[in-house]
């Protein structure tokens, strides 16, 4: 199935993102799950309406489903550096592929949230003048993130041009 | 800051805006306040107190404007325009002129009466119009605009599309007849609903004696907001003229109460949108808008933005104009093809009106059953390309290809066959790259084979 989303499969070498991103995403989901669970249990204890346990059940089902999907979603992330552009693909339900030319790059963001930092991961995001451009690569080891950032900046400077 | 290599050019002194500006700003604030207080307040507090409040606030606004005016200044340093302003928090902005997209000279009614003008700069990356310099004398504003554009042109000197020889006189391109403008705005849904609205108010007044003056006034005000849009359009687009100045830039002038004159370098045009409204079809009319990177997205109220290229015109005029603005794009001969028939499941009625195609210089997309629209983005202006496939599209083996242009507007080829979508995306990427490179000869290299992208260079 995923091969249908790969354009020019023989010519593009897709790089996966780190598998540790699965843990990061699961942890982030667990945190929000616990917070919402506490709220719901608190509401149940205080009010005792049947809607509260139903809400808990929905939350549990939703969290389990999202967690299962997360594993596959992280595996679906991929990026590829071509001669002139960066390809990023992601998404399971809605599949997306972005082609961003290096020459169009305005700036590169490297970010790392608290949980990401614990696992030694970072997110690289490429910004163009178009707000709709969507070139975000999460779950990169710091060395790879730095390499990608430097390569993008170098290529961007090489081919820098206005609009 | 002068660049280190150059000798420090005689730093020109910071200049002030025109001394009348605070007064004009004060009046502008007055209008806003009156609108905010609304009819409701007027009826509650009575006329005298209302007038008192308004007077106090106006004086306050003028005082604040005067302080603001004392703190505001601008000057050109090297290739930057520096603007200092701010009342409590001083703000110094340096606007790099190579990022200048368009300059507009606006003259609201009050400014017209006093011989002043407001200069607005559109800079890429700004979410709003950067640095409205309000107000300058018309002569100063025009001179500053010419100077800024000349500096911006120099900055982009390696760009072949920007020769700057301001000595050549302006050449008029077209003028929209006011009669056509009036007719076109009468042929809008709002104009058709106006009699209904008026009848509604009258019957309410006659039948229900309880309706007070305030109630009627509020209703009229509320309705005016929607129904008077055609009137506003007429006032705004009155006496619409297009010209090309010596530097090959587009000069757009229009407006009755508020005149606007906008200078757009042609290589700053990000996309052109063509619309054939349903009610205009009998007249075979269309209207054209252009996108420039500086203007914020569509949420800021379409009336405020200056994106007109042609408020109303027939097909031939539109065709000639599009050819002028995007050389190589012939409105009559754009190759668009519809999506495969199975896209019918997603667009039961409009599938035959959908289309996308690769023109010689532009990516073109059309859609719309009643109001037909056509978007053109030159390959050279494409920022990125995306292919998106939703769950239903996956079942139907379809995908949507987006071309992103600067300034938040994307052009979407909806529901193409998956294989065609990949080909489109790949072609867009390649053509965008070739269009960006200075030598236009390479454009002939674009082949239809998907392998072109990967041949090592």
Image: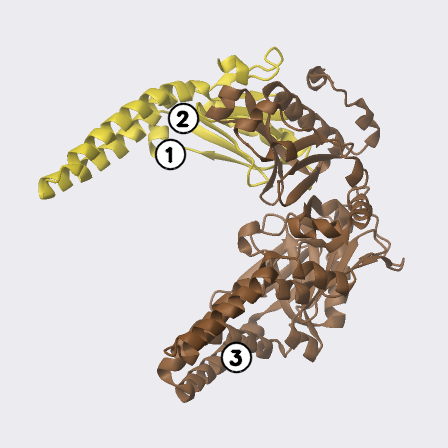
Identity of the residue drawn at 62% across and 21% down: B422
Chain letter for the residue marked with disc 2 in the picture: A
The label nearer to you, 3 versus 1, is 3
What's the CA distance linking mark 3 and mark 2?
Answer: 54 Å
Name the residue tied to disc 3. B62
Residue lying at the far front of the rendered structure: B207
Residue B164 location (% of width, % of height): 83, 52
In the depicted structure, whether residue A115 falls above or below residue B420? below
Identity of the residue drawn at 26% across and 29% down: A30
Tag shown at residue A113: 1
Q: Which element type, helix, strand or loop, lies under badge 3?
A: helix
Colour of chain B in the rendered structure image: brown
In the depicted structure, whether residue B448 falls above or below residue B263? above
Q: Which of B276 and B150 is in front in this view?
A: B276
Q: Nearer the viewer, residue A41 or B83?
A: A41
Q: Which element type, helix, strand or loop, lies under badge 2?
A: loop
Colour of chain A in the rendered structure image: yellow
In the depicted structure, whether residue A77 falls above or below residue B407? above
Q: Nearer the viewer, residue A15 or B94?
A: A15
């Amino acid at each position: 199935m995923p091969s249908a989303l790969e354009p020019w499969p023989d010519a593009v070498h897709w790089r996966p993102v780190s598998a540790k991103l699965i843990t990061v995403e699961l942890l982030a989901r667990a945190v929000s799950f616990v917070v919402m669970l506490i709220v719901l249990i608190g509401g149940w204890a205080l009010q005792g309406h049947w809607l509260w346990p139903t809400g808990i059940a929905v939350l549990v089902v939703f969290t389990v489903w999202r967690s299962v999907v997360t594993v596959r979603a992280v595996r679906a992330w991929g990026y590829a550096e071509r001669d002139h552009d960066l390809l990023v693909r992601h998404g399971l339900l809605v599949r997306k592929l972005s082609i961003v030319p290096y020459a169009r790059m305005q700036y590169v963001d490297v970010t790392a949230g608290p949980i990401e930092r614990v696992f030694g991961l970072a997110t690289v995001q490429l910004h163009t003048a178009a707000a709709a451009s969507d070139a975000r690569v999460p779950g990169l080891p710091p060395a790879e993130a730095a390499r990608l950032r430097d390569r993008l900046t170098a290529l961007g400077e090489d081919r820098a041009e206005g609009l | 800051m002068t660049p280190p290599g150059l000798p420090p050019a005689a730093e020109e002194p910071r200049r002030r805006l025109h001394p009348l500006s605070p007064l004009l700003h004060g009046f502008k604030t007055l209008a806003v306040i009156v609108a905010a207080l609304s009819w409701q307040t007027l009826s509650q507090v009575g006329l005298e107190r209302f007038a008192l409040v308004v007077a106090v606030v106006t004086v306050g606004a003028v005082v604040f404007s005067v302080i603001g005016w004392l703190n505001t200044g601008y000057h050109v340093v090297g290739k930057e325009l520096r603007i200092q302003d701010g009342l409590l928090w001083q703000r110094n902005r340096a606007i790099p002129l190579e990022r200048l997209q368009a300059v507009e000279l606006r003259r609201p009614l009050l400014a017209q009466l006093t011989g002043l003008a407001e200069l607005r700069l559109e800079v890429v990356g700004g979410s709003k119009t950067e640095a409205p310099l309000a107000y300058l004398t018309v002569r100063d504003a025009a001179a500053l605009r010419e100077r800024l554009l000349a500096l911006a042109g120099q900055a982009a000197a390696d760009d072949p599309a920007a020769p700057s020889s301001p000595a050549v006189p302006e050449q008029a391109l077209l003028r929209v007849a006011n009669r056509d403008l009036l007719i076109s705005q009468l042929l809008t849904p709002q104009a058709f609903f106006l009699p209904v609205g008026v009848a509604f108010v009258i019957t309410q007044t006659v039948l229900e004696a309880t309706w007070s003056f305030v109630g009627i006034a509020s209703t009229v005000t509320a309705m005016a907001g929607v129904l008077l849009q055609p009137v506003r359009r007429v006032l705004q687009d009155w006496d619409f003229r297009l010209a090309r100045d010596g530097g090959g830039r587009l000069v757009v002038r229009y407006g009755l109460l508020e005149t606007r004159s906008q200078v757009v370098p042609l290589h700053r045009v990000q996309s052109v949108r063509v619309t054939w409204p349903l009610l205009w079809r009998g007249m075979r009319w269309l209207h054209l808008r252009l996108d420039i990177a500086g203007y914020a997205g569509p949420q800021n109220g379409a009336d405020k933005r200056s994106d007109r290229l042609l408020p109303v015109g027939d097909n031939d005029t539109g065709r000639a104009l599009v050819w002028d603005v995007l050389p190589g794009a012939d409105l009559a001969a754009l190759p668009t093809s519809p999506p495969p028939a199975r896209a019918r499941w997603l667009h039961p009625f409009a599938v035959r009106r959908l289309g996308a195609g690769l023109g010689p210089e532009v990516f073109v997309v059309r859609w719309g059953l009643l109001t037909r629209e056509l978007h053109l983005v030159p390959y050279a202006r494409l920022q990125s390309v995306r292919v998106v496939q939703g769950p239903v599209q996956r079942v139907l083996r379809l995908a949507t290809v987006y071309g992103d242009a600067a300034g938040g507007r994307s052009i979407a080829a909806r529901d193409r066959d998956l294989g065609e979508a990949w080909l489109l995306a790949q072609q867009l990427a390649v053509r965008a790259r070739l269009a960006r490179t200075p030598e236009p000869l390479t454009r002939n290299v674009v082949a239809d084979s998907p392998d072109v992208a990967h041949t090592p260079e």
